[in-house]
Image: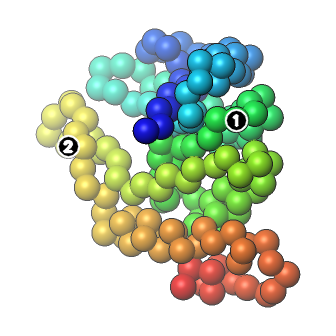
Amino acid sequence: MQIGAVVRIGPEESGAQPAPYAAIRDMACRIEDAAFDSIWVYDHFLYRWPGRPTDGIWESWTVLSALAQATQRVQLGTLVSCTPFRNPAVLAKMATTLDEVSGGRVILGLGAAGTSRSSTRSESRSTIAPVASRKRCRSSAPCCAPDALISRERTTPHQIAR
C-alpha cells in the first residue's frame, strides 16, 4: 500500500490569501521526511462556496514543478487535473516535461467532473460533467503518450490523441 498527502495551495480560511510558496515547500519536505509516498495538489482556479467570498489558489502545475526541485523521492500529482481547463496536448506536454524534471515521479490524474451552482438554491451541488467534457477527458488520456510528445517525428495533436 502507498500513502499520499495533499499539500494545501489555497487559503487556510475563507477570505485569506494562499500560503506563501516557502510554507508550501516546507510542508512538502515534512511530508517527504515523514515517509509518505506521494504529494498531491488540487487543480482549481478558484474556490467558490455559498455565502463566502471567492478564494484564490496557486496554479497546481507551477507548484508541482517547484516541488519537484524541493523534494527527492515522493511522487507528485494533481488531484485531479480538470481536462476542460487546458488543451489536451498542452496538458500532456506539461505532464511529460514535469515527469522529466522530477526524475519520473509524476502521477497524472485526469478528471472531468465539477460543481455547478443551482439556479434555484444558494447551495453548490456536485454534478456529472457535460457530455462534451467527458468526451474531452477520454480523448485526453491517449494524448499523454510521452514518446509521441518528445519524438522528433512530426505529429499533430489529432495524431497523438488517436
Residue at the extreme right: 152
Residue 91 quadrant: bottom right
**Residue shown at 24%/50% (left/top)?**
127
User: From the viewer's perspective, is residue 138 above or below residue 24?
Assistant: below
Residue annotated with mark 2: 119
* Residue 28 visible somewhere in the drawing: no
Q: Classify mark 1: helix, strand or loop.
A: loop
Mark 2 Cα-neighbour bin, 10 Å: few <14, some 14–19, many ≥20 = few
Front in this rendered view, residue 24 or 114:
24
Mark 1 Cα-neighbour bin, 10 Å: few <14, some 14–19, many ≥20 = some
**Residue shown at 53%/18% (left/top)?**
11
User: From the viewer's perspective, is residue 151 above or below residue 131?
Assistant: below
User: From the viewer's perspective, is residue 27 above or below residue 40?
Assistant: above
Q: Nearer the viewer, mark 1 or mark 2?
A: 1
**Residue shown at 42%/20% (left/top)?**
53
Coordinates of residue 117 in the picture (x, y in percent): 27, 41
Residue at the extreme left: 120
Total count of labels: 2
User: From the viewer's perspective, is residue 93 above or below residue 55?
Assistant: below
**Residue shown at 57%/50% (left/top)?**
107
Q: Are marks 1 and 2 in contact (CB under 8 Å)?
A: no
Coordinates of residue 128 in the picture (x, y in percent): 25, 55
- Badge number at residue 73: 1
* Residue 118 visible somewhere in the drawing: yes
117 to the left or right of 97: left
Q: CA distance from mark 1 to mark 2?
A: 46 Å
The type of residue carrying mark 2 is: Ser
Residue 66 quadrant: top right
Name the colouring of the figure. rainbow
Coordinates of residue 6 in the picture (x, y in percent): 50, 28
> In which quadrant is the C terminus drawn?
bottom right
- Badge number at residue 50: none
